[in-house]
Image: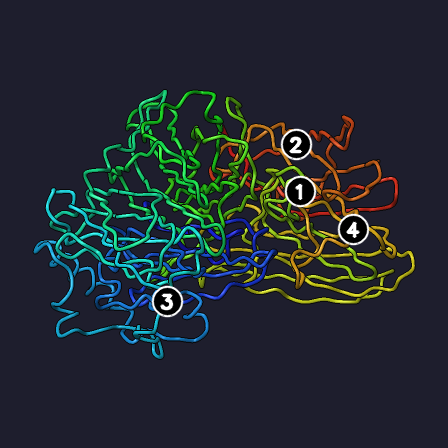
Amino acid sequence: MRRNFSVFAVLLAGAAGVAGLAPPSAAAAVSSPTVTLVTGDRVTVGTAPDGRDTFEVQPAATKGMARALVHLRLGGRDYEVPGTALPYLGRGLDLSLFDVKALLAGARAPVDTATFGAALAQQFKEDSARGRFGGQGLFAGGVRYALPGAPTRQAVRPRSVMRTVSLDATDIAGKPADTGIAFLYNTDDGDTLAPDENFNYFFGGTAKFSVPDGNYSALGVFWTSDADGNPTELRFSAQPEFAVKGDATVRVDAKRATSKLTWVTPRPALLDDTGFLFRRAAKTGPALLVDFDAGPGVPISVSPTSVPVRTGALQTYPYSRLVSPPGPGTPYEYVLQKASIGVIPQQRYVITAKDVAAVDATYFSEYSSLGLRQRSGMFSFEDVSGRPSHPIQLPRKQTEYVSAAPDLAWFGGFSKYVLPGPFPGWAGGQYEPFHTYRGGSSVTEDWNRFPLHPAGEVALLPLTDGRAYTLPGATRAGDLVRIAITPFSDNQLGHTGLGFYGEQRDTITGHYRFTQDGTTLAEGSPRSVSTVGFDQEVAPGPSTLGLTIDAGRTGPMYRESTATHTEWTWPSRHVEGVTLPPTLYCARGTDGPDRECAVEPLLTLGYAVGGLRPDGSTVSGPQGLDLTVGHLQRSTGSPVTAATVQYSTDGTTWQDATVTARGDGVFHADFAATTETFRGTDVSLRVTAADAAGATIAETITAAYHVYVS
């Protein structure tokens, strides 16, 4: 799956249709190439530590069928297809145009991608009005658009007896289907049919396939649209399993899709974004995946079944975001998806408090802006995952009711604004790694809560889980030290920032220095990357390693936590015979994730400013700061022994705060930060901490947060 654009890749491949992102644990700070589809949509691709591909799509359109996105996995290859292109596949538009890997290999679309998408949307609108697609306008005279060098389907001599399978269908209006798309899949061996042999279009109520004997699954996808080309209804009609021993006719009428997707929620909610995923796996070979993100408010109906499939596997699920009606009070939303295995159930889902986790979410921003939020869920059977993002007005507090299930892991992120330009990107936000929720639970999540500072990744899944991989901030394998620290991260466990990414109006600076016993071994100035990441060989004997990271970020959207200076020192020695648990990894190996390393005992800091408002400010006068000092996850750190806190309201003069130890690395600092100016003033912080083994951290945060006159 996908979804909409990000400057980073998604792990395990993955407003209303504006943008999307996923946690950096997916790509481990490796930059991701981006390609442009024939329709102008842009796809960012990365590789997960286990070698699986990751996808993010930025639609060129913001509404209509061009905004509706369909992810197809056919013959083990992934295709991103806008809704306006779907009815022209094989009759004017070659499937190769949407083959992301082919585009990455250097193939280029044969048209002007800046204009073709709009022309195709207009053609779709005209053909929808006449009730038949192809043969006119862009496709008059049998014109075929394909990537240069894409092969045309040629007749080949079959190695087995071929049968004609006719998928017969009536459309949503009850007429012989001339719209919609048919899929046929061999459930004995997913490689039986080539990618472009897995689908065909309906003409006069029939889509024909030539296939060998075997067990098959059929799916018809139908839609309607209004006069402006906006989708108005979507139906999935499936025959999940049948045998072919001779010529056969199978019906996938749209009217069979009698079960309308309906969510019954404890609180009133309005449908905002919705889609449906159909996955059919064979006994061997690649699975068929059809994931149709219909967009805002489009009703979806599905054909239910009651007999479980016997060959291969069948998995389906709907996914929707519902929002609270306009009105007073704290806004809320539901983010829901329910998986089914073996059968396609009735699509009426009654949601109770036990089905969801209630998330008390705050999105911090020092300026009012329109940001973006993505929350994406992945079931254990999925090969890829991702969900659309949606606009979110900032700063903001809201309650989020999120589906909870043991095999459902969530990831996502938040951007506090969108970079300007024709292909806007993310800026000033945070990522979160995969994690699960417990049904009936209540949790608190703070996004971008100041002060922001450098941090390493934290795995939120159990360390034995292994569904997703997290790269610790510092590891050592033998005498190779690997560093991965992300500046401008917030204080929610697991969150990491966007690092050194920004826009033309920003001034973003960074520098790091790595030492052994005071001798510099490596240094550099990162640009346009999320993470300070590097590998460095060190001398084998016991020594003291040091890391200094400077990060600065100023611009029209940044006022708080604009610069950090962080120094770490820690004892280190040669590492042998240590293996990380399944959820952590050291590096991407040739045969999968490399886990033969140990996590270095770097100290970590977490800040909680008392009374901080969502705009990053608190009242002038007495201040309370809770400081949590710990170590990188899974490291063998020693007990924390001391911490100091200093503060400044002018960035020059520093004063000591009164610090009280509360045990287990938690300290409380009391001080007074006052201002009499109308605009208030910023409070800068300077913190030090140490453990019993001699590891230290010293961190200065410029303009950490704001105080104002009440």
Looking at marks 2 and 3 on the same chain, the residue that comes earlier in the sequence is marked by: 3
Residue under label 4, please give it. 598
Q: Residue 34 placed where, x, y %? A: 44, 65
Q: Amino acid at mark 3?
A: Thr
SS at mark 4 in the image: strand
User: Which element type, helix, strand or loop, lies under badge 2?
Assistant: strand
- Determine which quarter of the picture holds residue 516: bottom right
Q: Are marks 4 and 2 in contact (CB under 8 Å)?
A: no
Q: CA distance from mark 2 to mark 1?
A: 10 Å
Count of numbered circles in the view: 4
Q: Is residue 282 left or right of residue 276?
A: right
283 sits to left or right of 420: right
Q: Amino acid at mark 4?
A: Ala
Q: Give the side of residue 453 with respect to residue 272, left or right.
A: right
- Neighbor class of circle 1 (other Cα within 10 Å; few <14, some 14-19, many 20+) is many
Q: Which badge, 3 or 1, is on the more N-terminal residue? A: 3
Comparing labels 4 and 2, the label whose residue is closer to the camera: 4
